[in-house]
Structures are given as C-alpha cells and as structure tokens.
Amino acid sequence: LAENTNETFSLFPNPSNDIITVQLAKRNEYHIIENMELIDQTGKVVATWSHIPTKFWFDTRQFPGGMYLLKVKSNIKTETIPIVIAGK
C-alpha cells in the first residue's frame, strides 16, 4: 500500500479496497480543502465533497473497482491524483 504525498496533502492508502484518507500538509498560512471530486475513467464525476476538514476519509466500497482521479481543491492549489479502487 502506497501513500501519495506532496507539499499540499497526503492521500493513503492507494490502492484501496475500503477507506481512503486525505490529509492536508501543515502550513504556516491558512489552508483548507474547499472541495473534492472523484472522477471515473469516462470523465464522469461520481462523487463530490465540499467544506471538508483538514483530515477527511471516504469509503471506496460504494464504487466499482478501477482507476479514478481525485481532484482536490484547496484555497492554495488544485491537484488531481490518480487512485486505484480495488473493488469487491
């Protein structure tokens, strides 16, 4: 199981078969996650979250297995991370 980490946030585990955690990196300035979108291989947004705390998790078991993109928009930066949902 891997962890995606950059200067803005970390995401783990990836791949996942149940829970994915997204956590903002500690910064000196005000930093929040404004919204997130989970996008499937066809480009369809299959889930959205907004007004998210600095540490957030979501259950992947409600989505079919496969490759997805998680678009994370903070007040500082927007990043899109590929994730793998292992499925049932």
Image (spheres, rainbow, N blue to C red):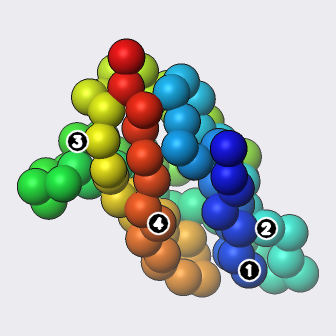
Q: Residue at x 32, y 52 (%)?
A: 68
Q: CA distance from mark 1 to mark 2?
A: 6 Å
Q: Nearer the viewer, mark 4 or mark 3?
A: 4
Which label number is shown at residue 81? 4
Amino acid type, callout 3: Val
- Inter-mark Cα distance, 4 to 2: 15 Å
The residue closer to the viewer here, 50 or 2, is 2
34 lies left or right of 85: right
Q: Is residue 12 above or below residue 86?
A: below
Disc 2 on helix, strand or loop? loop
Mark-to-mark CA distance, 3 and 2: 26 Å
Circle 1 residues within 10 Å: few <14, some 14–19, many ≥20? few
Q: Nearer the viewer, mark 1 or mark 4?
A: 4
Give the image location of residue 54, x and y in percent.
Answer: 71, 53
Which amino acid type is shown beneath numbered disc 4?
Ile
User: Which of the numbered marks, if any, corresponds to residue 25?
Assistant: 2
Q: Amino acid at mark 1?
A: Glu
**For residue 11, which quarter of the picture?**
bottom right
Q: Are marks 1 and 4 in contact (CB under 8 Å)?
A: no
Q: Are marks 1 and 2 in contact (CB under 8 Å)?
A: yes
Q: Give the residue type that dot 2 points to.
A: Ala
The mark that comes first in sequence, 1 or 3, is 1
* Disc 3, SS: strand
Q: Is residue 46 left or right of residue 11?
A: left
> As rendered, which of 9 and 75 lies closer to the eye?
9
Q: Position of residue 29 (x, y in %)?
A: 81, 82
Say whether disc 1 or disc 4 marks the residue closer to the N-terminus: 1
